[in-house]
């Protein structure tokens, strides 16, 4: 009998748990430890943030699903890993702290044979003074944040209807943010809703981003084959911004958010301020702050985790200049190099390097979009690691049997640009691979046959269908396992 | 609805014709099929 403990029930952890439960017989335990009571389809938080969806549209209770599937669910957060056990007890365990109302603050040691760290990001609002819903800006990263943002938008629209002219700032709240695609989606949904409300002329909308150019998306941009040309994603992105009347500021590190003013530095070293009435700025991400301790009680956090708190896995972490970065630096199995029964998937693993060229301002401030680990790769990692562990348990495999490198995997992304069956549109993109591979594809780093994008209603319909499909799958409804990540 | 003019001048702008096709139902139904096929190919290539 084996016990697999999964920390985190987001896209990657929930996928891993469901796949493991399907693959392993009931003599084996699958345990999910996650502080949230409800599962959240995070991509649709964008629509919550403009008031088109509510909490129940994008979340559901986890407990009944796990009970039905036979997964042992603990509403708790992992705090400390003991991969060698402690003292004379050699069995590895993880210390968890309950977050449920009934047991809040109670700690327990959970023994494991295999551990999957799928804890996602800590939303590091503290990196920028004044950033975030507890400061002076808004967010759409959680459904509560998004609901609060929708309220603020509603109030702003009322003010514009009353004759005021307002400035909206949307983007990234620090030079090292990731998830620029989410900010991109939000700005166009916001613009669309303001236009629908009939007050577009009263709104100045500014996109403030750490990307050195629009269309970078933290993946170093894309070269897209279209109309007989190979065109940089920048051209398409700028075109959309101009068409929709959204201004942009690129290469920006936000250094401070005051009640109605954002301070930022650009790559030329200039310091600027921008007054706003409404600001939705994403935070940078770090790891969630798990500690690790060896059998003797020594802190080994710095061995297991990178300085940003994400877990080291089978990647090549040698520091090297941008020109020497290779797709093969990226991990394949997501196994910890120190402990063969520990894995990290989704946002929780430490990327070996960025994808977008890191830059510094003239004053030395780092402006370096972090690499996104979006839903599809995160889900695939969760499934891949689950299958490897199942093989290790049932077939006695001594090393992971499955691979899923972001250097060999593609991604399909649909970025909403406004909601509506007839007038709604979205950008549908596929890229292959996610991590550019200039050895294999010297021209553009990616396979141009599979790196394509277009905008139209079709994309919106797909986005809408995916919303329902992924929630259906996450609820483990009949045939869920046939729906790919 | 004014974008800073130098940003606007340097970007490609879609014509009315391009905008029309983006939401023209019969054409978008066709694109729906094509984009879905593309995504299925990507999913197939990525689930090693
Ligand atoms: C606003 C927004 C829009 C997005 N839109 C898209 C999109 O359109 N398409 C797309 O592909 N991707 C999108 N993404 C990215 C996508 O949400 C992520 O790729 C995905 O959620 C990553 O999955 P994950 O499992 O790594 O992390 P998460 O989904 O964040 O899950 C992490 C889980 O770990 C739990 N946890 C945290 N700390 C602990 C702890 N100490 N112990 C145990 N559990 C813990 C959390 O509660 C959570 O359940 C978007 C992201 C945002 C913020």
Image (cartoon, rainbow, N blue to C red):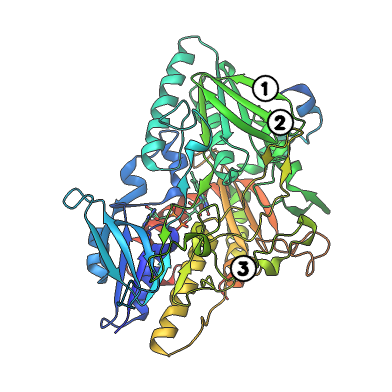
CA separation in Å, label 1 and label 2: 8 Å
Mark 2 packing: few (<14 Cα in 10 Å), some, or many (20+)? many
Of pointers 3 and 1, the one earlier in the residue sequence:
1
Q: Residue at x 44, y 28 (%)?
A: A135
Mark 1 lies within 8 Å of ligand 1 (Cβ measured): no
Q: Is residue A247 visible?
A: no
Mark 1 packing: few (<14 Cα in 10 Å), some, or many (20+)? few
Q: Where A216 sits versus A403, above or below?
A: above
Can you give x and y, in whole percent of width and height, for residue A163 in the image? 50, 9
Do tags 3 and 2 sit on the same chain?
A: yes
CA separation in Å, label 3 and label 1: 38 Å
Where does label 3 land, which residue? A315
Q: Is residue A171 visible?
A: yes
The disc at residue A272 is 1
Q: Residue at x 43, y 17 (%)?
A: A158
Q: Nearer the viewer, residue A305 or A347?
A: A305
Q: Chain of mark 1?
A: A
**Pointers 1 and 2 in contact (C-beta within 8 Å):** yes
Q: Find numbered disc 2 in the image and state the secondary structure of the residue it sits on.
A: strand
């Amino acid at each position: 009998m084996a016990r697999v403990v999964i920390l985190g029930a987001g896209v990657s952890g929930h996928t891993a748990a469901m796949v493991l439960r399907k693959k392993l017989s009931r003599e084996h335990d699958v345990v999910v430890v996650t502080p949230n009571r409800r599962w959240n389809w995070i991509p649709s938080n964008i629509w919550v943030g403009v008031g088109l969806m509510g909490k129940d549209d994008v979340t559901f209770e986890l407990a009944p699903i796990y009970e039905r599937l036979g997964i042992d669910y603990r509403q708790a957060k992992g705090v400390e890993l003991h991969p060698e056990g402690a003292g004379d007890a050699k069995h590895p365990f993880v210390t968890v702290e309950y977050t449920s109302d009934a047991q809040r603050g109670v700690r327990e040691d959970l023994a494991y044979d295999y551990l999957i760290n799928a804890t996602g990001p800590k939303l590091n609002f503290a990196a920028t003074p004044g950033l975030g819903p507890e400061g002076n800006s808004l967010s759409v990263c959680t459904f509560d944040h998004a609901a609060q943002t929708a309220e603020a938008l509603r109030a702003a629209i009322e003010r514009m209807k009353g004759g005021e002219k307002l400035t909206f700032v949307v983007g990234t709240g620090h030079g090292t943010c990731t998830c620029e695609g989410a900010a991109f989606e939000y700005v166009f949904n916001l613009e669309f809703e303001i236009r629908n409300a009939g007050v577009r002329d009263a709104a100045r909308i500014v996109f403030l981003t750490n990307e050195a150019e629009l269309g970078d998306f933290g993946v170093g941009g894309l070269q897209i084959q279209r109309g007989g040309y190979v065109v940089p994603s920048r051209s398409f992105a700028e075109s959309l911004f101009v068409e929709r009347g959204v201004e942009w500021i690129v290469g920006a590190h936000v250094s401070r958010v005051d009640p109605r003013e954002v301070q930022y530095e650009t790559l030329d070293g200039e310091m600027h301020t921008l007054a706003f009435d409404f600001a939705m700025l994403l935070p940078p991400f770090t790891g969630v702050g798990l500690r690790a301790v060896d059998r003797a009680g020594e802190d080994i956090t710095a061995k297991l985790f990178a300085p940003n708190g994400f877990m080291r896995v089978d990647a090549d972490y040698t520091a090297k200049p941008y020109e020497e970065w290779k797709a093969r630096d990226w991990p394949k199995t997501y196994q910890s190099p120190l402990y063969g029964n520990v894995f990290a998937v989704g946002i929780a693993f430490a990327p070996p390097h960025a994808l977008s060229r890191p830059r510094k301002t003239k004053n030395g401030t780092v402006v370096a979009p972090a690499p996104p680990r979006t839903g599809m790769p995160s889900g695939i990692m969760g499934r891949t690691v689950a299958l490897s562990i199942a093989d290790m348990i049932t077939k006695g495999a001594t090393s992971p049997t499955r691979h899923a490198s972001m250097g060999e995997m593609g991604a399909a992304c649909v970025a909403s640009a406004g909601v509506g069956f007839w007038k709604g549109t979205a950008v549908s993109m596929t890229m292959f691979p996610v991590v550019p591979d200039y050895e294999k594809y010297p021209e553009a780093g990616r396979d141009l046959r599979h790196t394509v994008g277009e905008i139209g209603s079709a994309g919106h319909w797909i986005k809408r269908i995916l919303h329902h499909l992924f929630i259906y799958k996450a609820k483990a409804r009949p045939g869920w396992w046939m729906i790919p990540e | 609805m004014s974008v800073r003019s130098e940003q606007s001048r340097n970007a490609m702008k879609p014509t009315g014709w391009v905008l029309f096709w983006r939401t023209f139902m019969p054409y978008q139904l066709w694109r729906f099929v094509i984009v879905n096929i593309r995504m299925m190919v990507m999913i197939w290539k990525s689930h090693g």
